[in-house]
């Protein structure tokens, strides 16, 4: 007789069902696992055997074979321990076969039978719900998985608790969702003195999810401005929070099962590898671009990143997805993020200051910014020069709008966009619009059209740049509460599109 249990294997954010088959047959005593397991899965036999021994359950002197089906799907991770144990307990007639088959299980076993939390409980719960099965997971993962409302989640502390629950000796209560993490107190935009044009660019970028580049001398406030971006972004919607949390669940970043409504803000160091930024590694884990999904990816010292890493950003920026190719699988992660880059104008940083610049001016600026290719630079919607702030301005009291005031304007503009794209899948902000939809929502009036045409001819805008100017103009009009894209909106959008003086 073959007993069956069910679990999942992760391919990106997709959780694919895996049937765990267990047969106890006559023959020389052995315990083998087949079905393309990795090292962690193969070692499950020793953890399962010892955990059962700690519960005073002796394995028979027979041949035990566990098959993970489909056999051609790679099985990675220690979460296969619990479903293998369930299938074996069912084969030994300790657990009812029908009960085990109605459960999707994942969890790592300690040698004493304790269940250790694993990554991916949230996408596993969603897969279980689609199969009309309940989810069995470690107690520490229950709060995370319980966020899937249409799935029953049983969270157990040990394998002994699982046996007592399914044999009716001591039933466990369904897990409760974790707490919604409070948004951290953001730094106020009003703390930044001067830099009104950069603040305006930050507001436009936040309202339409446009990519933004700051170029300026060291200490001019580029990083300071970017650090205040989370304080003006609207909170995640419920679908966005669930989608973002699934990615963070696979990366093991959810804290005690809590889901946050704050948008991700990722800031990798410029020494980060391609696998760290794009994703990959042995188990094709999500990278920074996916961890920043529905949020912000801030890349300080942008030209200092390896050229190969920068060029790999081009495709995710355009498609909102990243495909990690492996010999045996292709893993896809979503990555709709706002890219905010900061750069010095040259290696020494003082290209525009004759008193402090190095002797290679202007060639040092050309060489330094030349590390950013033209196609990648063309994908930035807004380019802003951030000049140094004078000492007299630093002594002045804080001025300008607070983050609360700016965030209210941004939220109002986002609501207009959500209403506009309410019936369209895959579109939520102006940055998503393209083709016929872009022409429909952002058709400029006659004066604005003439201005855009002249700017495109004079500054040799590419087709991509032309459409990105229109998207930014549409966002500016939304901030202004205007249904029509008029000349002032287009003029401001064009001014942010032109190359900054510092970057040549």
Image (cartoon, grey):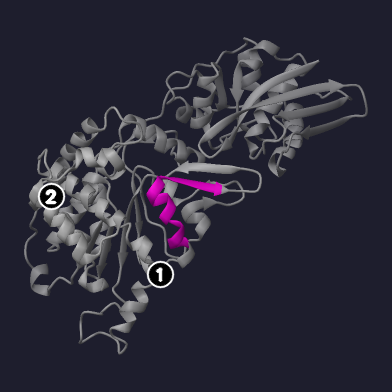
Q: Which residue is mark 1?
A: 304
Of 87 and 434, nearer the camera is 434
Query: Which secondary structure lies at badge 1?
Result: helix
Which contiguous range is marked in magenta?
309-324
Q: Is residue 487 visible?
A: yes
Query: Which residue corresponds to the image point at 10% horizontal and 44% vertical from the top-left?
Result: 480
Q: Which residue is mark 2?
A: 402
Using residue 309 as the reference point, say whether residue 208 is left or right of it. left
Q: Is residue 156 visible?
A: no
Query: Which residue corresponds to the image point at 8% horizontal and 51% vertical from the top-left?
Result: 447
- Please state the horizontal and vertical placement of residue 481, each as a whole percent of the image: 10, 39
Of 271 and 52, nearer the camera is 271
Quarter of the figure that contains the N terminus: top right
- Please state the horizontal and vertical placement of residue 286, each as a whole percent of the image: 50, 46
Tell me which corner region of the image, top left, top right, bottom left or bottom right, holds residue 314.
bottom left
Q: Which mark is residue 379?
A: none
Spatial CA distance of label 1 from label 2 is 32 Å
Using residue 128 as the reference point, say whether residue 83 is left or right of it. right
Q: Main secondary structure of the magenta part?
A: helix
Using residue 488 as the reference point, say whether residue 182 is left or right of it. right
Tell me which corner region of the image, top left, top right, bottom left or bottom right, holds residue 431.
top left
Query: Which secondary structure lies at badge 2?
Result: loop
Circle 2 Cα neighbour tier, 10 Å, few/some/many (<14 / 14–19 / ≥20): some
Residue extending farthest to the bottom is 359
- In the image, is residue 162 part of the stretch drawn in magenta? no
Task: Mark 1 or mark 2: name the one nearer the start of the chain.
Answer: 1
Q: Are marks 1 and 2 in contact (CB under 8 Å)?
A: no
């Amino acid at each position: 007789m073959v007993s069956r249990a069910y679990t999942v294997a992760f391919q990106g954010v997709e959780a694919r069902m895996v049937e765990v088959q267990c047969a106890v047959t006559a023959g020389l005593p052995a315990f083998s696992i087949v079905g393309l397991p990795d090292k962690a899965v193969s070692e499950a036999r020793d953890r399962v055997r010892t955990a059962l021994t700690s519960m005073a359950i002796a394995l028979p002197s027979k041949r035990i074979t566990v098959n993970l089906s489909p056999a051609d799907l790679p099985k990675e991770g220690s979460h296969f321990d619990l479903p293998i144990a369930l299938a074996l307990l069912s084969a030994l007639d300790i657990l009812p076969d029908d009960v085990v088959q109605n459960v999707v299980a994942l969890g790592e076993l300690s040698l004493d039978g304790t269940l250790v939390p694993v990554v991916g409980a949230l996408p596993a719960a969603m897969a279980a719900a689609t199969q009309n099965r309940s989810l069995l997971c470690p107690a520490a993962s229950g709060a995370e998985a319980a966020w899937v409302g249409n799935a029953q989640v049983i969270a157990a502390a040990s394998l002994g608790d699982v046996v007592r629950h399914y044999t009716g000796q001591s039933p466990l209560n369904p897990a409760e969702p974790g707490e919604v993490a409070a948004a951290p107190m953001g730094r106020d935009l009003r703390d930044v003195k001067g830099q009104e044009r950069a603040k305006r660019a930050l507001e436009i970028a936040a309202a339409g999810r446009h990519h933004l580049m700051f170029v300026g001398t060291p200490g001019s406030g580029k990083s300071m401005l970017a650090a205040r971006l989370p304080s003006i972004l609207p909170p995640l919607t419920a679908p966005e929070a669930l989608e973002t949390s699934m990615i963070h669940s696979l990366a093991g970043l959810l804290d005690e099962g809590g889901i946050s409504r704050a948008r991700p803000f990722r800031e990798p160091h410029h020494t980060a590898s391609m696998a760290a930024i794009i994703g990959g590694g042995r188990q094709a884990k999500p990278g920074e671009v996916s961890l920043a999904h529905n949020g912000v990816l801030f890349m300080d010292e942008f030209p200092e990143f390896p050229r190969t890493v920068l060029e790999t950003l081009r495709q995710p920026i355009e498609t909102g997805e990243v495909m990690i190719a492996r010999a045996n699988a292709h893993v896809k992660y979503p990555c709709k993020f706002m890219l905010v880059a900061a750069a010095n104008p040259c290696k020494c940083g003082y290209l525009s200051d004759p008193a402090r610049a190095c002797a290679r001016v202007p060639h040092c600026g050309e060489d330094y910014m030349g590390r950013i290719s033209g196609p990648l630079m063309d994908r930035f919607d807004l380019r802003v020069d951030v000049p140094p702030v004078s000492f007299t301005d630093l002594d002045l009291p804080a001025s300008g709008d607070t983050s609360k005031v700016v965030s209210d304007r941004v939220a109002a503009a986002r609501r207009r966009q959500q209403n506009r794209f309410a019936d369209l899948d895959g579109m939520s902000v102006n940055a998503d619009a393209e083709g016929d939809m872009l022409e429909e929502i952002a058709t400029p009036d006659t004066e604005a059209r003439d201005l855009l045409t002249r700017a495109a001819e004079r500054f040799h805008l590419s087709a991509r740049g032309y459409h990105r100017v229109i998207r930014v103009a549409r966002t500016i009009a939304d901030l202004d509460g205007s249904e029509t894209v008029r000349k002032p909106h287009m003029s401001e959008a064009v001014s942010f599109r032109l190359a900054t003086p510092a970057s040549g």
